[in-house]
């Protein structure tokens, strides 16, 4: 698979990332331990053997089980750890933690950042996380306190590089001003169904600051593909009929399927968007790689953009 540098670092990543969110099941659809171990391992190995070198995780995925399954797979597959980049994220705390009346919230307190990272390292069974991200903005987060936690993790050899997820450009600037390390990535929702990053300054900032955008839900929760649909509440109103019509037309002309065209649309952008492939189906994981083997024309790209807008450009 083709590769790309992450941010202004020397880290070389595959153009597609494999996302570990669902390998242990979701919060409302947990898999049994045996099912998660077998299915998760099959998905991870399929990604690894297909050339994915960036594996995206988080402390909350599967209640921590996703990291355990990845760690177990790393121990079972010779050479895998040395050939891939592992990410994790922290900062989302579910309701009931640590007390029964604790609300769902975001937490960038220094002690929690450090403890979350150490817990992830233990679950993964590794000594260093290649790229550690703040998951969602904490309104009470102090950039200077966060910088201190980052420095502690870096100095201890527990994290190589840092990034953010779901951050507005202004928050990226505020944090980068305090942190002595370059923020390599901003992981945000980007797809033909969710194009806010094109217009709110996120991708402009990525181009300016050499930050790599990672696209979660690149198929609009599956609405742009031909597989399962798993919509978050904020995605319930996505309208994709017109988009899918043009996706199908281009797919037929290209001799591929609409999923690959939707990925290729993201890959075309000059900021170097890295789509996160989240399916656990090994065949679909392997097939997605084909999206890196062709490039849409400007005309095809804008046909899709206009279809997504639902009206002509001014």
Image (cartoon, grey):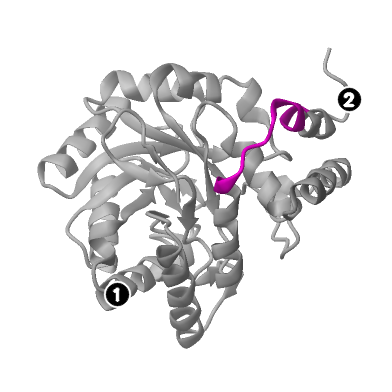
Say left or right for 6 vs 114.
right
User: Of callouts 2 and 1, which one flags the residue occurring earlier in the amino acid sequence?
Assistant: 1
Report x, y in % for residue 149. 22, 38
- Asked if residue 294 is among those painted magenta in the image, a careful observer would answer yes
**Numbered circle sitting on residue 311:** 2
In the foreground, 92 or 105 = 92
Residue furthest to the bottom in view is: 34
In the foreground, 91 or 44 = 44
Report x, y in % for residue 209. 40, 19
Q: In the figure, residue 280 lies in which quadrant?
A: bottom right
Badge 1 marks a residue whose secondary structure is loop
Report x, y in % for residue 88. 36, 52
Report x, y in % for residue 227. 72, 64
Up-down relation of residue 28 to residue 263 (above or below):
below
**Numbered circle sitting on residue 77:** 1
Badge 2 marks a residue whose secondary structure is loop
How many angstroms separate mark 2 from mark 1 (CA)? Answer: 50 Å
Highlighted range, magenta: 292-302
Residue at x-position 75% and y-position 53%: 255
Say left or right for 111 vs 257.
left
């Amino acid at each position: 698979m083709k590769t790309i540098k992450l941010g202004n670092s020397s880290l070389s990543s595959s153009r597609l990332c494999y996302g570990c969110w669902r390998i242990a099941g979701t919060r409302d659809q947990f898999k049994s331990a045996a099912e998660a171990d077998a299915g998760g391992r099959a998905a991870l190995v399929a990604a690894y053997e297909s050339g994915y070198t960036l594996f995206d995780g988080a402390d909350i995925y599967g209640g921590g089980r996703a990291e355990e399954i990845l760690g177990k797979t790393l121990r079972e597959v010779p050479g895998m750890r040395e050939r891939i980049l592992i990410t994790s994220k922290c900062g989302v705390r579910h309701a009931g933690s640590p007390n029964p009346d604790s609300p769902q919230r975001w937490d960038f307190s220094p002690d929690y950042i450090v403890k979350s990272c150490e817990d992830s390292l233990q679950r993964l069974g590794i000594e260093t996380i290649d790229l550690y991200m703040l998951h969602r903005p904490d309104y009470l987060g102090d950039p200077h306190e966060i910088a201190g936690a980052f420095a502690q993790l870096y100095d201890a050899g527990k994290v190589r590089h840092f990034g953010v997820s779901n951050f507005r450009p202004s928050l990226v600037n505020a944090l980068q001003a305090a942190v002595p390390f370059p923020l390599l990535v901003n992981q945000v929702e980007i797809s033909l169904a969710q194009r806010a990053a094109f217009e709110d300054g996120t991708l402009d900032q990525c181009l300016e600051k050499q930050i790599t955008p990672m696209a979660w839900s690149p198929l609009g929760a599956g609405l742009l593909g031909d597989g399962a649909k798993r919509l978050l509440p904020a995605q319930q109103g996505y309208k994709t009929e017109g988009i899918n019509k043009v996706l199908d037309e281009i797919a037929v002309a290209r001799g591929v399927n609409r999923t690959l065209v939707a990925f290729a649309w993201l890959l075309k952008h000059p900021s170097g968007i890295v789509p996160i492939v989240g399916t656990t189906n090994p065949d679909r994981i392997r097939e997605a790689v084909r999206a890196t083997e062709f490039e849409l024309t400007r005309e095809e790209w804008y046909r899709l953009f206009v279809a997504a807008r639902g009206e002509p450009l001014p």
